Image (tube, helix red, strand yellow):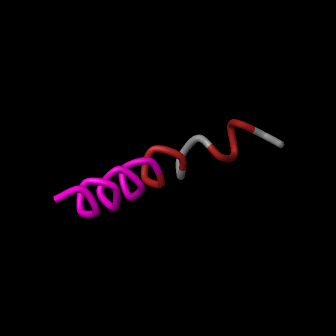
């Protein structure tokens, strides 16, 4: 698994996941 290859999409995925969690909580 190449981290350099995943790096660009990782932050976007994290933001999407956090947004979904926040929507679930409220």
Q: Is the C terminus in the top left, top right, bottom left or bottom right quadrant?
A: bottom left
Q: Is the N terminus in the top left, top right, bottom left or bottom right quadrant?
A: top right
| Front position in the image: 20 or 3 | 20
In the rendered image, residue 24, in percent from the top left (x then y), is placed at 28, 62
Q: Is residue 18 left or right of residue 5?
A: left
In the rendered image, residue 20, in percent from the top left (x then y), is placed at 33, 61
Residue at horizontal 24%, vertical 62%? 23
Q: In this view, does 16 lie to the left or right of 2?
A: left
Farthest residue in the right direction?
Answer: 1
24 inside magenta stretch: yes
Q: Is residue 15 left or right of residue 6?
A: left
In the rendered image, residue 22, in percent from the top left (x then y), is placed at 25, 54
Residue at horizontal 34%, vertical 55%? 21
Residue 25 location, quadrant:
bottom left
| Front position in the image: 21 or 12 | 21
In the rendered image, residue 6, in percent from the top left (x then y), is placed at 65, 46
7 inside magenta stretch: no
Vertical side of 4 occupied by 19: above or below = below
Please name the predominant secondary structure of the magenta segment in the image: helix
Q: Give the range drawn in magenta.
A: 14-26
Residue at horizontal 71%, vertical 37%? 3
Q: Is residue 9 left or right of residue 16?
A: right
Farthest residue in the left direction?
Answer: 26
């Amino acid at each position: 698994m190449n981290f350099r290859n995943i790096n660009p999409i990782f932050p976007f995925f994290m933001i999407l996941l956090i947004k979904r969690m926040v929507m679930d909580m409220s």
